[in-house]
Image: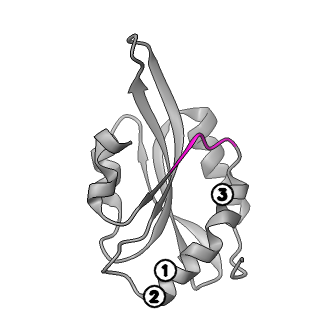
Amino acid sequence: MNAGVQVPDDCVEKFTEIKMGKKLRYAIFKIEDKKTVVVDTQGSKEDSGWEEFVKALPEEEPRYALVDVDYETDDGRPGSKLTFVYWSPDDKCGVKDKMLYSSTKETVKKKFTGIMKEVQANDHGDLEWKGI
């Protein structure tokens, strides 16, 4: 079910910038006025790692995020995975916000073709590096 929330082209362009340009580490998206997904914040590869991304998530509001996660394979080769994060703090955000974000999640993901991994996080423990 979609709550009628729109995902404008500038969000898709931000996704493409992360996916292809490799200049951005992450982009965090929010739903504005219960109508439109917008870019809330972003971090560059030069200045941001996983820890900076996690700190940028708000404590009391849900968000969607795209993160270019760098990792090393078992044989030492570098790799990266474009990861979609659905952040919905369990005890800190309202039920209406949770429902809005939950009902819009699939619509948002469909706009971002090429996601390699998805993570749903309800607290910071779900975003510990070892779990990613």
Residue at the extreme top of the image, as rendered: 75
Task: Assess whether mark 3 and mark 2 are in contact (beta carbons under 8 angstroms).
Answer: no
Give amino acid for label 2.
Val
Residue in front for this viewpoint, 7 or 13: 7
Local packing at callout 3 (Cα closer than 10 Å; few below 14, some 14-19, many 20+) is some
**Mark 2–mark 3 distance (CA, rounded to whole Å):** 21 Å
| Residue occupied by mark 1 | 98
| Residue occupied by mark 2 | 95
Q: In which quarter of the image is the C terminus?
A: top left
Q: What element carries label 2?
A: helix
* Residue under the point 42% across and 19% down: 73
Q: Earlier in the sequence, mark 2 or mark 3?
A: 2
Please state the horizontal and vertical placement of residue 123, each as a whole percent of the image: 31, 64
Q: Is residue 7 above or below residue 23?
A: below
Q: Is residue 23 above or below residue 105?
A: above
Please state if 104 lies on the left or on the right of 90 as rendered: right
Find out whether residue 115 is within the magenta segment: yes
Residue 115 visible in the snapshot: yes
Q: Main SS type for the magenta part?
A: loop
Task: Assess whether mark 2 and mark 1 are in contact (beta carbons under 8 angstroms).
Answer: yes
**Mark 1–mark 2 distance (CA, rounded to whole Å):** 5 Å
Q: How is the image coloured?
A: one colour
Residue in front for this viewpoint, 29 or 89: 89
Please state the horizontal and vertical placement of residue 55, each as a whole percent of the image: 28, 57
Give amino acid for label 1.
Lys
Local packing at callout 1 (Cα closer than 10 Å; few below 14, some 14-19, many 20+) is some
| Residue occupied by mark 3 | 109
Find out whether residue 98 is within the magenta segment: no
Please state the horizontal and vertical placement of residue 60, each as a whole percent of the image: 33, 77
Please state if 4 lies on the left or on the right of 34 as rendered: right
Which region shows up in magenta?
A: 114-118
Q: In which quarter of the image is the N terminus?
A: bottom right
